Image (cartoon, grey):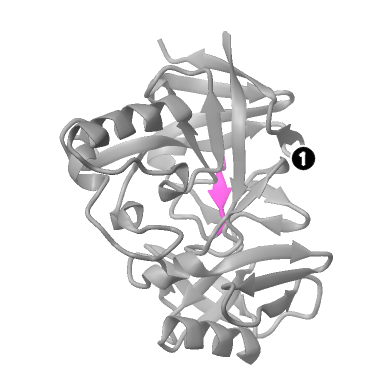
Amino acid sequence: MSDARIAGLYVYPVKGARGLAIDAATAAATGLGVAGVADREWMVIRPDGRFLTQRELPRLALVVPEVDDDVLMLGTGERAAVAIPLRHPHGAAREVTVWRSHVRGFDEGDDAARWLSAHLDCAVRLVRFDRSKQRDCNPEFVGDSGAHTLFADGYPVLVIGTASLEDLNERLGAAGEDALPMNRFRPNIVLDDLPAYDEDHLDTLAIGDVVLRMVKPCIRCQVTTTDQDTAVVGREPLTTLAGYRHDERLEGVAFGMNAIVAQGVGGTVAVGDAAGVRYRF
């Protein structure tokens, strides 16, 4: 086993909105969390309960979360923020859909709905995951581990190496395109001291008492083409990635690895921590 290093940690309280760059996080079965806020614990939905992300609403990228004591604040820098108490009687539970999963969410009320609807220019609601009904990950990739998640696309943690982005940016530069920041790929854990794309071949990543197991390449969608600072949609990096990162089995372009928390629930991971890597071969 060799070592990498944790270069960055990110939690995305609201699916599709801006992430929180954090110094340390607590590992839960459903992914990383900080200050009582879990990754993808909230989600924007249509009135019929179907989930919405930057795929349909690029302006979600401009929604910036902050945690202030017992409140989740959502702002844009241009409009007064809306406050969502973290500890209060929830609104009514309702059925919601994220991809093929039918789960339940607690409606966060009219103030949050009005604020988001005004920013996104369409009628939406905000819901918080109802943990009384577990959302299991695909057993094809996680086996009988019991791995589950909240409103993430499918798995609790996304891991990317800085060298992989550096390689992609070299290719983009050779094609006359601008380099891209890591936030285009919305990772939870960023690794230094790992060769480009070696995350593809990892079996486990051990950070203190916390052990992550890599389970599936992350197939990338058009969200990666949205500038996270402006919400402007372009065409890269998908065009370039398609030329050398096509995964035939999963029928898409892969960048980063999805992971589950195999051991150490409740443990802490921090930027700068050594991460013991064990390969599958």
- x, y (%) of residue 230? 41, 64
Residue underneath mark 1:
266
Does the magenta portion include 207?
no
The image quarter in which residue 246 lies: top left
- x, y (%) of residue 215? 44, 33
Q: Is residue 254 left or right of residue 135?
A: left
> How many other residues sit within 10 Å of disc 1, few (<14), some (14-19) or many (≥20)?
some
The image quarter in which residue 179 lies: top left
Going 40% across and 87% down the picture, which residue do you hit?
122
Prevailing SS of the magenta stretch: loop
- Secondary structure, mark 1, is loop
The image quarter in which residue 26 lies: top right
- x, y (%) of residue 107? 61, 81
Going 48% across and 18% down the picture, which residue do you hit?
194
Highlighted magenta segment, given as a residue range: 145-150
- x, y (%) of residue 117? 49, 86
In the foreground, 139 or 48: 48
Does 187 sit above or below residue 279?
below
Going 46% across and 60% down the picture, which residue do you hit?
229
In the foreground, 160 or 44: 160
Does 10 sit above or below residue 249?
below
Q: Is the C terminus in the top left, top right, bottom left or bottom right quadrant?
A: top left
Going 72% across and 32% down the picture, which residue do you hit?
264
Q: Amino acid at mark 1?
A: Gly
In the foreground, 224 or 92: 224
Q: Is residue 270 left or right of residue 232?
A: right
Does 6 sit above or below residue 96?
above
Q: Is the N terminus in the top left, top right, bottom left or bottom right quadrant?
A: top right
Q: Is residue 99 left or right of residue 207?
A: left
